[in-house]
Image (cartoon, rainbow, N blue to C red):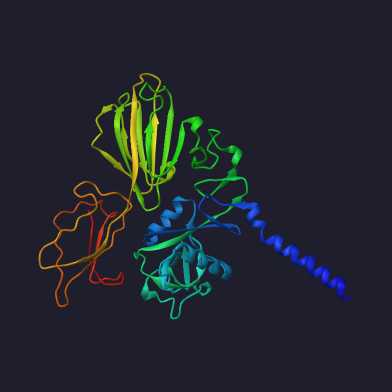
Amino acid sequence: MLRPRLAALAVLCIHLVSAQDTSSKLFSCPTGWELRGLHCYRFFSILHSWENAAQLCNRYGSDLLLVESYAENNFTAKLAYRSLGPVDRSNQKYWLGLASLDDLRTNTLESAGGVLVSQYAGFWSLDQPEPSSGECVDVTLTDDQQSWELQTCESLLPFLCRANACPAGSFHCSNSRCINSAFRCDREDDCGDWSDEVDCPQHCHYYMASSGDVVESPNYPHKYEPLSTCKWTLEGPQGHNILLQFQEFETEKTFDTVQILVGGRTEDKAVSLATLSGKQDLGNKSFVSASNFMIIKFSTDGSVEKKGFRASWKTEPQTCGGNLRATPQPQTLKSPGYPQNYPGGLECLYILTAQQGRIITLEIQDLDLEKNRDYILIRDGSSPKSPPIARLTG
C-alpha cells in the first residue's frame, strides 16, 4: 500500500519544482533588472530624497518599491544586501515607496504609485511607526534582514524600484506597458510614449548608452535631407549629467531646428532645454542635462538644406556636498559650476562643523535659484531632523 503513495508524492514534488521556474520562462525584465514572480526589481545606489527617488523610478516605468508580502520583504532584503557591495552593510538604509497620511491618525500609508496601505501590514522596527520621526518609510538593513521605520523625507538614501514584468518576447515600454516586439520601429506609437521608436536607426532614431560619443546630422559635412526628423536619445550612467557641445552648427534659420530635451528618456517625460537654428558658433557653450538622459531632435523642412551639425557628448558625475570644517577665517561655498548655471537634478548635503563652543555664521552673498522649485534649506544641526533655520529660493 505504500508504493502508490510514494509514487504520487514523487510526481507532486517534480511538479512543484518545475512550477518554480515558470515565471522566468514566461516573463522577462529590461536589461539590468531582476525578475521575481510578476515583478522586476532594480536597486539604485545613488543617494536621493524620497520624492526624487520616486521620480527617478517613474522615468524607468516603475515605482519606488511597495512590499506586499513576507516573501517579497525577504527577497528585497537579499537583493539590497547584494547590491550594496563589499562595504559595511550593517544598519544600511534605503527608501521604500510608502509615506504616512495624516500623521497616521487613520492608520494609513500611501505608496508612490497611489495605493493606500494599512500601517498594520508593515514589517516595522521596534517602537515604529513613530509619526514624529518623519513621513516617509525607509528600510534598515541588517545582514540580509530588514525592518521599516519612518524617516524625514529629505534624507538622502539609496532606493529600490519595482516594475511589472512583461510576457517573454515582449518589448518593455518606458511607461511600463508591454507590447509585441514585432511592433517596434513601425513608425506607430504603440507604447503611448514613443519609446518603441527610440532605437530605430533605419528611421534616423538612435539610442546611445555610454559615457560619451559623437552626434552628427545625416550626411555631415554634406547637406542634410529635406523633410526629415532625426532623434538621438542619450543615456549615461546613473548619478551622472550629460554635457553636450557643438563643434559646428549650420542649419536653415528658423525652419530647420535642433531641439535639446533633458530629464527623461522619452519626450513626454523630458523638458526642452534649448532650440537652435541658423549658423552659430557654439564651441564655448555646453548644454547640461538635469539627469543621465538627453534627447537631441533634428527637424527639417522641404526648402533649404545646409551642412548641419557635429557635436560631442560626455558624462560627468553629480558630485557635491560633504563635511566641511568651519574656521575663524572666512571660507567660500559655491554651487556646482558657479558662476555659470548649476546642472539640474542635484541634491547636495553640506555638513558644517566648528570647534566646540564656537558658532557658525553663514552669509549669503549671491543667490539666483528657480523660485520654489530649487532651494537652499539650512538646519541647526547635522541631522535631517534638526530644526530648520531658513529656506531660501528665488
- How many numbered badges does the structure rendering display? 0
Position above or below: 59 against 90: above
Q: Nearer the viewer, residue 151 or 212?
A: 212
Classify residue 374 as left or right of residue 92: left
Position above or below: 381 against 60: below
> At x 47% / y 51%, what residue is drawn?
60
Position above or below: 302 against 239: above
Q: Quadrant of residue 224?
A: top left
Classify residue 357 as left or right of residue 49: left
Looking at the image, the residue that sits furthest to the bottom is 127
Looking at the image, the residue that sits furthest to the left is 329
Classify residue 46 as left or right of residue 357: right
> At x 62% / y 45%, what residue is drawn?
169
Q: Residue 247: horizontal and vertical position, in percent?
A: 29, 32
Q: Nearer the viewer, residue 287 or 136?
A: 287
Looking at the image, the residue that sits furthest to the front is 86
Looking at the image, the residue that sits furthest to the right is 1
Q: Residue 270: horizontal and vertical position, in percent?
A: 39, 44
Position above or below: 81 against 343: below
Placement of the N terminus among the 4 image quadrants? bottom right
Q: Residue 109: horizontal and vertical position, in percent?
A: 47, 68
Q: Nearer the viewer, residue 348 or 16?
A: 16
Q: Quadrant of residue 389?
A: bottom left
Q: Residue 65: horizontal and vertical position, in percent?
A: 49, 62
> At x 40% / y 70%, what residue is drawn?
88
